[in-house]
Image (spheres, coloured by chain):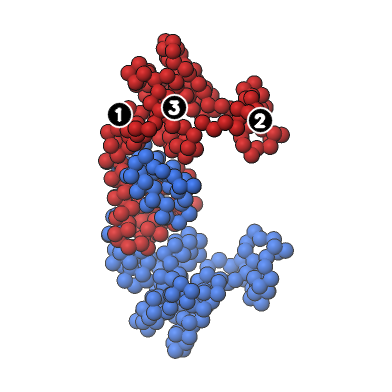
Chain colours: A blue, B red
Amino acid sequence: MNQTYPSQLLENAVNEFSKLPGIGRKTALRLVLHLLRQEENEVFDFSEAIVKLKNEVKYCKVCHNISDTEICSICAHPARDRQTVCVVENIKDVMVIENTLQFKGLYHVLGGIISPMDGIGPGNLEIDSLVKRIPEENIKEVILALSATMEGDTTNFYIFRKLAAFKDLKISVIARGVSIGDELEYADEITLGRSIINRTLFNESFKSN
Amino acid sequence: MNQTYPSQLLENAVNEFSKLPGIGRKTALRLVLHLLRQEENEVFDFSEAIVKLKNEVKYCKVCHNISDTEICSICAHPARDRQTVCVVENIKDVMVIENTLQFKGLYHVLGGIISPMDGIGPGNLEIDSLVKRIPEENIKEVILALSATMEGDTTNFYIFRKLAAFKDLKISVIARGVSIGDELEYADEITLGRSIINRTLFNESFKSN
């Protein structure tokens, strides 16, 4: 249904909000009317926070994670294990892994995964800079933590080939298996098959990092 | 779980987004990261649309609907029935009723409904201005189109009392009844009871406005 708006300004704001992922025109209108009910300075703060983020945000020169400084707080942290690098697709994945508190090494954010369908090739990703880091930073292990999808596997394989030249480098992939809390009968066959092949020793499965 | 953000700017933007109704911190992060991937001018347009709306929007001097001009497009429209006024709670209700294409009169936006729980009394609403409009604009009918809630009924009753002094004024309330498409057995008893009391003649129920 084609909604008519009583105000062009209102319509513009609704249009902008409905460009956001998962926000339809009805939700957009609700959000805009909510903002309209707020004090002027609150609306200004909202708008300011977004523009400021876009204008002032930096990306870490080493790992390409989002950062307020030239080198991000993870790369600059003195207590992190500087010889292990975890390769992830994007900023959000860094946050997700950091939240597990199970990884004390550094990261490398690719900025995407190889996806010919979306026109993303290896050249669009931070793969060359990853290769350069290995000798420069004397890295001993690269952990590939990409999505368990076709694109993730392709990217894993591409990186594996690129890093094969470093003879002493350990290259690992995060474990695939049945999620904790999942019932076995509902796990898909491929995952279940993989989790049997990659089974771990009983005592080792409870070891923390 | 307390998420740590790699950037203060990112955290600020997420905080602002998560103040919006129905937007949690996870969704806020998703929206902010989406904006971050857009071109600078697109992010600026987004932010500009909101600030502009807040700074420049006007409210119609007659009906208090949102408007780009002193008098809104509905009040200024030459073909509308100027003797019938539909009283609604807010701007959104005007849009909803306009979308039905069943009402050709004018509106009066109260800006809320009487709700002692939220500290909203009659004095906070545009009720006095409604009372003034009746003789000034020679209005013949007021249609009360508020929510079918306790607060809506209270407000209806308050307005009814205020307007009782105008002897020739017709005061009506929108019909309450079983929704079109609803099965009878799932309608609640109060609605069903009301729809029996307020039954319409069979030939009249198909009449359009």
Q: Label 3, on which residue?
A: B86
Residue A104 location (% of width, % of height) = 45, 67
Q: CA distance from mark 1 to mark 3?
A: 16 Å
Q: Label 2, on which residue?
A: B188
Nearer to us in this view, A74 or A91: A91
Q: Chain of mark 3?
A: B
| Residue found at x 48% / y 85% | A161
Residue A77 location (% of width, % of height) = 36, 66
Tag on residue B155?
A: none
Amino acid beneath label 3: Cys
Q: Label 1, on which residue?
A: B61
Q: Residues within 10 Å of mark 1 (few under 14, many from 20)?
A: some
Nearer to us in this view, B174 or A15: B174
Q: Chain of mark 1?
A: B
| Residue found at x 39% / y 76% | A124
Residue B192 location (% of width, % of height) = 66, 27
| Residue found at x 28% / y 67% | A70
Asked if marks 1 and 3 fall on the same chain, the answer is yes
